[in-house]
Amino acid sequence: MAQLGSSNDDLTDQALGQMSVQVEFALPQIVSGAVSNLLDQGGNALSGEITLFGGLLNRDGDPNTDATLVFQGSGDPVDKSDNSIAFDLTFEGDFLNSDISGIWG
């Protein structure tokens, strides 16, 4: 769930989506992926997606106290009122479990 800007207007203030992330440790930009199936706070679909890119891996970081994975995202999904919503985000989190079954942050 992302909280977006001010609630003092008629724009979407919250968004929820499904994030698909690929991590290739040998590449300079280790993360690729997208956030899709976006919904606003009323359950209305947003068209478009957020592209995920970049990525830094802190191999010496302690996942109990540090973000060990950082990457960016951007996109301009459109809400039910045809308002384009600019997303420019940074994800900071960690891999889950020793088998790297997911990420959280």
Image: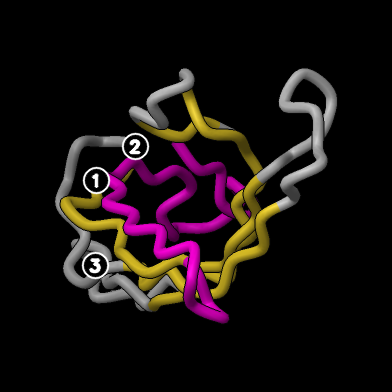
Q: Is residue 15 magenta?
A: yes
Residue 32 position, x and y percent, is: 37, 69
Query: Could you say which is closer to the camera, residue 22 or residue 8?
Result: 22
Instruction: List the residue tagged with mark 2.
Output: 41
Residue 62 quadrant: top right
Label of residue 11 in the image: none
What is the C-alpha distance between the residues marked 2 and 1?
A: 7 Å
SS for callout 3: loop
| Residue at x 63% of width, y 48% of height | 69
Q: Is residue 7 left or right of residue 98?
A: right
Q: Is residue 31 left or right of residue 91?
A: left
Instruction: List the residue tagged with mark 1.
Output: 39
| Residue at x 27% of width, y 52% of height | 20
Label of residue 81 in the image: 3
The reply to whether the C-beta atoms of the residues labelled 2 and 3 are less than 8 Å apart is no
Q: Amino acid at mark 3?
A: Ser
Q: Residues within 10 Å of mark 3 (few under 14, many from 20)?
A: few
Q: Amino acid at mark 1?
A: Leu
What are the residue bounds of the magenta stretch? 1-30
Residue 74 position, x and y percent, is: 48, 74
| Residue at x 60% of width, y 34% of height | 94
SS for callout 2: loop
